[in-house]
Amino acid sequence: MGGDRAGRRGVPARGGGGRLRGDAPRTAAARASRLTWVRLASTLRYLALLALGGYGVLLLVVLVFSVWLLGDVGALRSAAWGAPALLAIAVPVFVALAWLEGRLRG
């Protein structure tokens, strides 16, 4: 037995750089590449809230500046129908750029 505790699980091995014996190094790319249903649902929820929040802020800006200050009632209708087209372009571009950033950093 002696005083050598390095063979036990949970005790750092000598010269292991802080890792435990038998543990494989986990890089950020390895963690990011594992897409589980929980992460997918969380990501989709985040994107939906981000898109709906942005849509609401855009409509609020149009309401204040175009309708209230300038008196252009048609601007709100135009923004309400045009903003989903912008979201249909912006959300996939955001997802693609976020994926690309993760790949380049990993």
Image: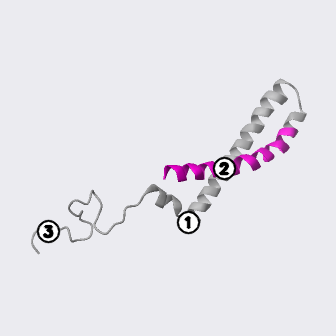
Task: Give x and y (percent) for residue 75.
Answer: 86, 34
Q: Which mark is residue 4?
A: 3
Residues shaded magenta: 78-106
Amino acid on which the number 3 mark rests in the picture: Asp
> In the image, which disc is placed on residue 65?
none
Q: Estimate how packed mark 3 is, as few (under 14), some (14 to 19) or many (20 or more) residues with alpha carbons within 10 Å.
A: few
Quadrant housing the N terminus: bottom left
Question: In the rendered structure, which amino acid carries the disc numbered 1?
Answer: Thr
- x then y, percent, for residue 84: 79, 47
Residue that appears at 60% across and 56% down = 43
The crowd level at tag 2 (other Cα within 10 Å; few <14, some 14-19, many 20+) is few
Q: Which residue is mark 2?
A: 49
Q: Nearer the viewer, residue 5 or 103?
A: 103
Left or right relative to 70: residue 34: left
Label 3 close to label 1 by CB (< 8 Å): no
Mark 1 or 2: the one toward you: 1
* Residue 51 rendering spot, x and y as whole percentages: 70, 47
Is residue 54 shown above or below 31? above
In the depicted view, which residue is nearer to us: 56 or 102?
102
Q: Which residue corresponds to mark 1?
A: 36
- Left or right: where 78 falls relative to 42: right
**Quarter of image, res 77:** top right
Any magenta on residue 51? no
